Amino acid sequence: MENKQFKIIPYIPEYAEQTVKMWRDSKLKAIGIREIHSFETHIYFLNNILMKEFIVELAIVNEKVAGMIAYHQSEISQLYVHNHFQQFGIGKTLLQRAKGTSTGRLILRTFEVNKKAQRFYEKNGFTVIGRGHENEENLPDLLYEWKAKA
């Protein structure tokens, strides 16, 4: 069996292609729709836009990108775990890192079609506080909130 131990590191551009491939593959499996942006545009977004607004961290297994998160004190923008590395605690570990640096409240959005993500977030203390479809895919989504226990 493959070693599923992982380490969390700050994002570095040397991992850009692996990160974007993992992100696109796991998103496709989660929502069944191909990414609307080109691979190159997605790398540009990661390196030049997401990095400026959020802390981006990677979960690494055997020098491969197994997951990623982009967050700041009040929001999680992106959280993806490679399809082959789900159920090993990577998503929960990444989520804990965001909770640990939060103001005590985090929000995030997930697609309504992504039932697996909904179960994950609800299991980890998030509740639905809104619904919409303000995303590039124009799919119904859910706005989740987590509040630290007082």
Image: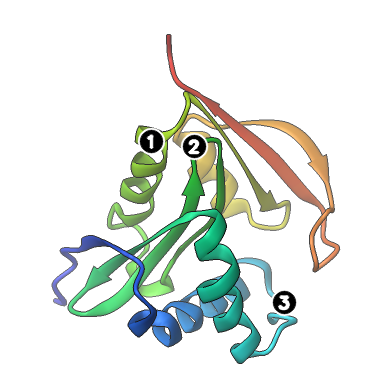
Is residue 118 placed above or below 40 in the rendered structure? Answer: above
The residue under the point 58% across, 81% down is 44
Q: Nearer the viewer, mark 3 or mark 2?
A: 2
- Decide: marks 2, 1 in contact (CB < 8 A)? yes
Q: Is residue 32 above or below residue 111?
A: below
Q: Secondary structure at mark 2?
A: loop
| Sequence-earlier tag: 2 or 1 | 2
Q: In the rendered structure, which amino acid carries the disc numbered 3?
A: Ile
Find disc 3 in the rendering and name its residue: 33
Q: Is residue 137 left or right of residue 103?
A: right
The amino acid pointed to by label 1 is Thr
Q: Secondary structure at mark 3?
A: loop
State how far apart marks 3 and 1 are (Cα). Answer: 32 Å
Which residue is found at the position 49% from the left and 84% from the top? Answer: 21
Residue 40 numbered mark, or none:
none
Q: Percent position (x, y) of residue 32?
A: 68, 74
Determine contact: label 3, label 2, CB under 8 Å. no
